[in-house]
Amino acid sequence: MTDRPPLPVAPEPNAVPAIVEAKDLERYVGQSLRTEELVVNMGPQHPSTHGVLRVVIKTDGEVVTALQPHIGNLHRCAEKIGESIPYYQWLPYVDRMDYLAAMNNEHGACIAIERLGGLVVPERGEYCRVIIAEVQRILSHVMAVGVYGLDVGAITPFLHSFRERERGLDLLDHISGGRLLYHYVRIGGVKRDLSPEWIDECRAFLAQVERRLPEYNALLLNNHIFRERTCGIGVIPRDLAIAWGVTGPALRASGVDWDCRRDAPYGIYDRFSFDVPVAPSGLSGVVGDCFHRHWIRVMEIEQSIRIVRQALEQMPEGETQGKVPKGFKPPKGEVFLRVENPRGELAYYLISDGGDKAYRARCRGPSFSNIAVITEVAPGTLLADLVALMGSMDIVLGEVDR
Amino acid sequence: MREWIDHLAATNELIGSLPRGFLYTIGIALGCTAVLLFVSLFAGEIVWMERRVAGRMQARIGPNRVGPQGLLQFLADGVKLLAKEDVIPAGADKPVFLLAPIIVFAGAFAAFAAIPFGYGLVPADMNVGLFFILSISSIEVVGVIMAGWASNSKWAVLGAMREVAQVVSYEMPLAISALTVVVLSGTLNLTDIALQQSGGIWNWYVLQSPATFAGFFIFFTAMLAALKRAPFDLPEAESELVAGFHTEYTGFRFAVFFLAEYSGMFLFAILTAVLFFGGWNSGFGLESLLSGEAERWVGALILFVKSCFFLFVMIWVRWSLPRYRVDKVMYLCYKVLLPWSVVAVVVAALQVLLFSALGWSR
């Protein structure tokens, strides 16, 4: 069966056509002008869709009446590839899902595979993992905070955020050799040990981020125009957030006190003391609005700095890479693990049939659920608010499509 | 301009033998050409200034390769844009599409005819100068709506819609807040307005009355909106509308829009300086030390420096603030700026009445 175009509908006898010839004008005197909704294609090349998201928007003037995100432009078969190559070869592909949080992706994938195979990671390796995962979270959030400024029209904080990000990328570059995709976390440990020089540089980086955060807040969080643009805009109520599977900062901005690192600990996150920022902020706005999502990210940067500092303090000496048998074949079984990515809960579901490849590899990307909810929230808002809303969800299309 | 020509005609027999009307016409044409050249070149330098200041603010460098400190960057950009393919989108309304940049350019540049760059340095010294500038600079809107409509692009139409709504609305507080000065000075001639502010800094209109003091801030805000500068850059809101009405323009046509935008900035920077900040008067009696031509050109330099300061403020604001939302922009115009500008004019009028009743001058 092929889809046929719908049959043309006979026009109403007296309906005003879209274009009226001058000679026919008199016929339509007294009738109101025919108006139409404008269907606009936002993306995949639009500057504020953060990648290759395509959103088809129906607009009535500036008001969005309906919208439909079209995803899949960045689909790279990450899951299927995971089923056709050995586990250790899959890790670089995992990097590429959420390319702004590659370390966090690797961290989760490695833990899932280790649980499947019953492997043990040395203490120092665990600490290295937490440190780089949190550094990555800081980088991701710093960038999200800056890019959100760009979405609401402030360009300067965006470039400031790249100044901090650059320093952090240098850190990750030092230990892994890559700036965006690292392949640093390996099954059973990490690739390289953190040197004392690296640790000093890391502390300096943390101090720099801490010092600059008030600057960002002066330019965005405490700016009057920024608050006007974000407070009460794109409100995702608590129930809606839960129903649509929204996770991460967006969920906490809706007032749900949930963070995998604290409530479903993985790795060694249960050893650190940190707060989970939850809306309301007590500043302004409504719980679940764009302002709170932004606020949560700013607060989480501070908490991540706390975690990294504790980890650097506590880190024991020793090996970083545990023993992994040659031709690693986990026993039959399955594992489900969720980890807290900067964007939300990233979950891995792996089934092993006893071979060196996963029988089934499946990921649950937080951005996918987070972007889906905009179809509920956006109708009725202005076009400018839609941009503010999409920006505040902080999606990465690589992970939506995988 | 006329006094120069009269002077020339009186001293040179050959020139004096020609009819005066012809000489005036030639003089105005030459003056306008000089202004056009100067403004086009300086608009390029404003682009450079904007990029350097933005770079400084954003912890980067900005263009510094072409010419000393990158001063000739705009020439390189202009050549690049000239060399680009001139794309006319399929389905575009071709004649309108081609005409739109010309109208925008004409509107922006015609306004300079009545701008005094210094005492006597005005191409056409008309007694309705301010009125002329405000009205002819709004012709730009026609070009913008033509560009948006003819592009056959939805983003361009949305951008043009926003721009027309915004610019037409903000013309009102802009003109009314400028009226505060007109009410006090009793003239629309910009040369006369500037002359009235000679002497000390307290003679500047911004310090003359609470009405003009408030009027200046309303004028500056409305000016930012009329120029589509951030935080009111909605028509070109990059993150929302791609590039607004000139989304589909490429090459030199795009450059013309760009040039018109920056020359508009320069226009209003000079206008602010002339109306509120003493024009070419330094404010501390520097002119009294000089005389004749030297005074004229030093005055022009002072005015230039003042307008550069306002350009800097515009750039500074742009790179600091997020963008307003479209409905808030309209709210600000009709419910905040417009009523307060009317109040300012009424206060100015009452002041004039009161002062004349008491027999004070100003």
Image (cartoon, coloured by chain):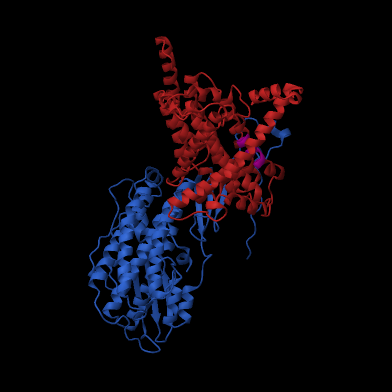
Work out whether A5 lies above or below B245. below
Give the image location of residue B350, x and y in percent: 42, 16
Image quarter of the N terminus of chain B:
top right
**Nearest to the observer: residue A35 or residue A79:** A79
Q: Quadrant of the C terminus of chain B?
A: top left
Question: Any magenta on residue B104?
Answer: yes
> In the rendered view, does B82 fall on the left or right side of B171?
right
Q: Nearer the viewer, residue B105 or B167?
A: B105
Chain in blue, by letter, is A
Q: What segment carries the magenta color?
A: B100-109
Colour red, chain: B
Judge whether B118 appears above or below A67 on screen.
above
Q: Quadrant of residue B143?
A: top right
Whether B186 is drawn above or below A224: the answer is above
Magenta stretch holds residue A348:
no
Q: Is residue B221 visible?
A: yes
